[in-house]
Amino acid sequence: MTEARLPFTPAVRVGEVRPFHVMELLRRARELEAAGQDIVHMEIGEPDFATAEPVVEAGRRALAEGRTGYLPAAGLPALREAIAGHYAAEYGADVSPERIFITPGASGALTLAMALTADPGREVLLPEPGYPCNRNFATVVNAVPRPVPVTGDTDFQLTPERAAREVNAATAAILIGSPANPTGTMAAPEALEGLAALADDRGIALMVDEIYHGLCYTGRMASAVVHAPQALVINSFSKYFGMTGWRLGWLVVPEGLETATERLIQNLYINASTPAQYAALSCFTPAAREIFEARREAFRERRDFLLPALRELGFAIPGEPAGAFYLYADVSALAGDSEALARGLLERAGVAATPGLDFESAAPERHLRFAYTTGLERLEEGVERIRRYLAAG
């Protein structure tokens, strides 16, 4: 399609924002489905469960009661208090509700965190492989995303020692994910503490993306609210709480940053969705929690099937990914190029998986991300299709 000629030159940052390649893969998968081909979807990081009924009912009730006007920019006070209670119950952490700000999804929280910490021209350290939009959040505020390659040797997590070697006079912030996308690995308590000490010593910000918290399958989760209390902590109602399309998240800021955060929210988006905030209150009820925990067990069952099944086919997956719903597999024993392998699997086997191109620049051709966000029977079908594809050469 020929693009229309604009009467002006778009801002430079528009050209610097890279595309999200998985969306093109999804577009092609939808085309194949429209043509009648069955596709096993293992590419998109969206839970396949509908929003839990207690949450839906709370949203209906909010609409019926006319709760559709503006809220305070920082968020519904009762929701901020509920999140503070969640931190106390889950982690034993005393987080003041005044430090918790409700945002339009974790994307809104990440954009806000970048705006709060990174001046134009300053660098934000981003471990790779990592969530591809992180570099674009930095770009939008005219900061400089600087990738730091991490490997399976450190569980794909940025260690304090490595971070200390990378921090320089231009560094404004470090952003890590735990559990991480695309690897599913988590930062240990001592790693969070070490990164927090480094950030404090060097006078830089530490941002910790915890949007997959709750989806953990080995032991207890370590949260930055406990082990890095001066960090900016990002979370979301999309993953564990299953509210993807409601677009609701939150940001915890260090004490002393509350006024600046509220001022930015007032100017950037006024407030996150009002009905969604009332609906989210029900996420912290026993009835909703029972549903979320049953779904977490379903994800665990899927992981426990898919991890050994992919290894048996020749995919190398180091360690034991502890959280989220992804496996980041090294394909180098099976193919020389993960993007070509992904295309072949989609077109010839009807299996959609995401090549490493979205997640890293160091060795993207070696990796595929598999998302176990579809049912166990479909995962079994997908593995069998991959098996046949590889056997056919």
Image (cartoon, helix red, strand yellow):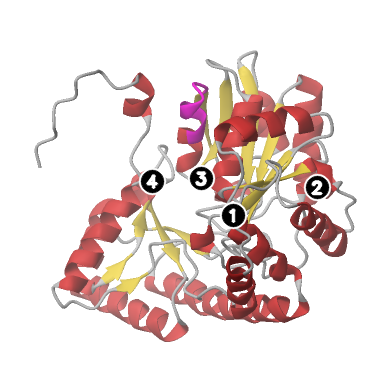
Q: Which is more N-terminal, label 3 or label 2?
A: 3
Q: Position of residue 253 (x, y in %)?
A: 75, 38
What are the residue bounds of the magenta stretch? 137-143
What's the residue type where badge 2 is placed?
Val
Q: Which is more N-terminal, label 2 or label 1?
A: 2
Return the residue at label 3: 130
**Residue situated in front as seen by the camera: 280 or 193:** 280
Query: From the viewer's perspective, is residue 152 above or below residue 59?
Result: above
Mark pair 2, 4: CA separation: 29 Å
What's the residue type where badge 4 is placed?
Asp
Query: From the viewer's perspective, is residue 12 above or below residue 346?
Result: above
What's the residue type where badge 1 is placed?
Leu
Q: Is residue 49 a member of the stretch shown in magenta? A: no
**Mark 2 vs mark 4: in front:** 2
Return the residue at label 4: 358
Query: From the viewer's perspective, is residue 239 above or below residue 182?
Result: below
Q: Which mark is residue 225?
A: 2
Tag 4: Cα neighbours inside 10 Å, few (<14), some, or many (≥20)?
Answer: many
Return the residue at label 1: 248
Label 2 sits on a secondary structure element that is helix
Q: Are marks 3 and 1 in contact (CB under 8 Å)?
A: no
Mark pair 1, 2: CA separation: 19 Å
**Mark 4 vs mark 1: in front:** 1
Mark pair 3, 1: CA separation: 21 Å
**Residue situated in front as seen by the camera: 198 or 99:** 99
